[in-house]
Image: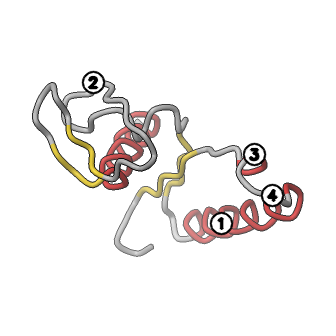
Amino acid sequence: MKRYDLIAFEDLNVQGMVKNHHLAKSIVDAGWQYTAYKAESAGKRVVQVNPHQTSQRCASCGEIVKKTLAERVHCCPFCGYEQDRDVNAAINILQLARQKAS
């Protein structure tokens, strides 16, 4: 946490993602709350962003590129940008968090 001034999370609906909704939500919420608590006590900013299309949006040009969950590489037909799907999403999450934080 010492290296970064901003920590960004997707504001996910964890209840809809796991089988034991009550237990899983409690565990995940506790983990995020602890991270946020530690970050804020270290003087860092924590921002949650809307997860809508973070995996589909090209981090380079902003166009929406539909893909299935099986497709692990983001290949933009509009600008030619190629990146691991998760890295592309992480860049989008960071960009959204920076916009929200400013």
Residue at x 22%, y 51% (from the top left corner): 83
Mark 4–mark 3 CB contact (< 8 Å) = no
Label 2 and label 1: CA atoms lie apart by 35 Å
Residue at x 42%, y 40% (from the top left corner): 68
Label 4 and label 3: CA atoms lie apart by 8 Å
Specify which label sits upstream in the sequence, 1 or 3. Answer: 3
Judged by depth in the image, the label closer to the viewer, 4 or 2, is: 4
Residue indicated by mark 3: 16
Residue kind at label 2, given as amino acid type:
Glu
Checking the image for residue 63, the label placed there is: 2
Checking the image for residue 19, the label placed there is: 4
Checking the image for residue 77, the label placed there is: none
Judged by depth in the image, the label closer to the viewer, 2 or 1, is: 2
Residues 57 and 8: in front is 57
Residue 39 on image: x %, y % = 55, 66
> In the drawing, does residue 83 fall left or right of residue 69?
left
Residue kind at label 3, given as amino acid type:
Gly
Residue indicated by mark 1: 37
* Element type at mark 1: helix
> In the drawing, does residue 63 fall left or right of residue 82?
right
Residue 44, above or below 59: below
Number of numbered discs on residues: 4
Mark 1–mark 3 CB contact (< 8 Å) = no
Specify which label sits upstream in the sequence, 2 or 1. Answer: 1
Label 1 and label 3: CA atoms lie apart by 25 Å
Specify which label sits upstream in the sequence, 4 or 2. Answer: 4
